[in-house]
Image (tube, rainbow, N blue to C red):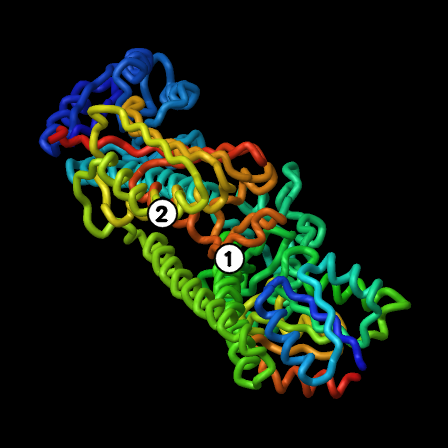
Amino acid sequence: MKKILLVDDDVDFVEATKLILESKSYNVVTAYSGKEGIEKVKSENPDLIVLDVMMPKPDGYEVCAKLKADPELCNIPIILLTAVVSKISSTGYTKEMGMRIEADDYIDKPVEPSELVKSIERLI
Amino acid sequence: MGIKLLVIDDEQIIRDGCTRILSKEGYDVTTAEGGEQGLEIIHKQRPDIVLLDMKMPGISGLEVLGRINQLKIDVTVIVITGYATVETAVDAMKEGAYDFISKPFNPDQLRLVVKRAVEKRRLEQEAKMLLKDITNEKSRMRTIIYCMADGVLVTNMKGELVLYNPAASRMLAIADNSAPGKPIRELIRHKEIVEMIEKQISSINSSLSSIYKEVSVNKNTVLRVHIAPVRGELGELLGFVSVLQDISQLRAMDQMKSDFVAMVCHQLRSPLSTVIQQIGAILTGVVEKEKEKEMLIKVKERIRDLISLINNLLDISKIEAGLAIQHKELLRLDEILKETIEFLKPQAEEKKIEMEVFIESNLPSIDGDRECIKEVFLNLIGNAINYTPQDGKIKVDAIKEGECLKVNVADTGIGIPKEDIPRIFDKFYRVRTDKTQKIRGSGLGLSIVKGIIEAHLGSIHVESKPDKGTTFTLFLPASINPNI
């Protein structure tokens, strides 16, 4: 069974998403902050990471950059979840920014459960 | 006309004749018999025009002319020459005489020669005034350019800087002692601007129009550079004037606005996306029956939070538009405080928090909007309850201090970390620690409170110690209307 690490500071979102993913036969472990996320990557060794961008520092982008820079962990596919409209913000929270940071996929919130599942299936 | 004439001639007939004829013309005429007397009168009375006989006993006319020149005063000399002696006239002109009239002369000739001299003086005066005007105008222009807040640079067709003002010097860090006339490449460090100007100079079509461009000169400064051609009288190109406008503030404001919009987007979309996820999960049937109800309750809470957020956003936009105060009236703080505390009592009792209120007697009223002031205390006291654990204590007191009312809202709650205090009134700012994880809020409450208090011309301050508690102090000006 494939293991997915779900990182998001919104407890309810994590709970609902976990239920959905588990129903698709994935093993889900959770983290509620960037810091916890990095710890869990090392301890749980997931097959894929679903990472929310808008969290208090370290935010999703920082976590993604850190993981991709680590030679041992850079091969784990990462899906970034963004909740901000790409065009408006220039503070770096954009889909384009996600591209530069080299995540493996990025999905805008609100995320259609089926879309998330499809993306996961494509990557692992 | 007030023009003073002096006639120096040894012949009385000439003196009398001139006096008679010229007085009739309105001139003020004085006479002298000889050179010495004449010079004395010149020295004392400063005539405008002197009629000088060249052939006199004693000191000669030419010598008198020489002495007049030495005086260095503004006098026009007309020499009276003897019988047809052109040489004398020429010598006199060389010595600085303006004109000559030869004896014998008739009244018309006399009047004419004097009139010419008067006209010459008038033209000289006019020229002097014009020159003064131009100098004034020039210095006025210079003063204007020097005082402008925008930077001004004038370059000639050789790319040399011929004029710049203090504002330009500041914006581009031009060294203080740079003499004008140096090439701009040497004086201005910002390549983009130098290139812009040089391009205009060398471009064939540059004479057609002015151009502008926004240039970043350093991390915090953005300038709008506007370059226009300077032409001479015949339309020929003399150089270029560049005007530099500092638009850094405008840019910063734009940035803040788009940051705010991005934040709002996120704050609205995030809970909505969670709610969709939760409902999606229920509809897909992956949620156990017992957990469904729990989840739906959470959905309801989230939606309530969203509604509250939207209301807060509307408040903020009203405050920013200066429309915070919709309806002003005389308000009694003791009434409003009592009302608010009654309303929040159930929440406080749930956490076993003790509420203490002290309102000074005869507290003056304030001029304000009732709904706004209610909101302020609802927010402050509500926060105190939310951020104070079980068995805590909240104390609200209101006293008169000077011309103001001073209200303290103090709690024994978890407090605010030192590094968060400067930002506590910022929009969307929320303290994120383990202790605050469970507390719900939009991060707009204090921003709204501050906005309302300031719209009422008051001020708000905060003091806090982590784990010891927080005290918010606000000042509101007392109403100038007498207490009812």
The subunit letter for the residue under badge 2 reads B
Q: Earlier in the sequence, mark 2 or mark 1?
A: 1
Q: What's the residue type where badge 1 is placed?
A: Met
Q: Can you see residue B228?
A: no
- Which residue is disc 1 drawn over? B256
Residue B355, horizontal then vertical, whole percent: 38, 35
Point out the image quarter for the N terminus of chain B. top left
**B342 lies above or below B273:** above
- Judge the density around disc 1: few (<14), some (14-19), many (≥20) Cα neighbours within 10 Å: few
* Relative depth, front residue between B469 and B37: B469
Q: Nearer the viewer, mark 2 or mark 1?
A: 2
Residue B96, position as x, y percentages in the image = 41, 31
Q: Nearer the viewer, residue B34 or B294?
A: B294
Give residue B346's mark. Answer: 2
- Under mark 2, the amino acid is Pro
Q: Position of residue B300 (x, y in %)?
A: 43, 69
User: In what quadrant of the picture does the C terminus of chain B appear?
Assistant: top left
Query: Which residue corresponds to the image point at 31% horizontal and 23% vertical from the top-left?
Result: B401
| SS at mark 2 in the image | helix
Q: Position of residue A40 (x, y in %)?
A: 78, 63
Q: Residue furthest front?
A: B290
Q: Which mark is drawn over residue B64?
A: none
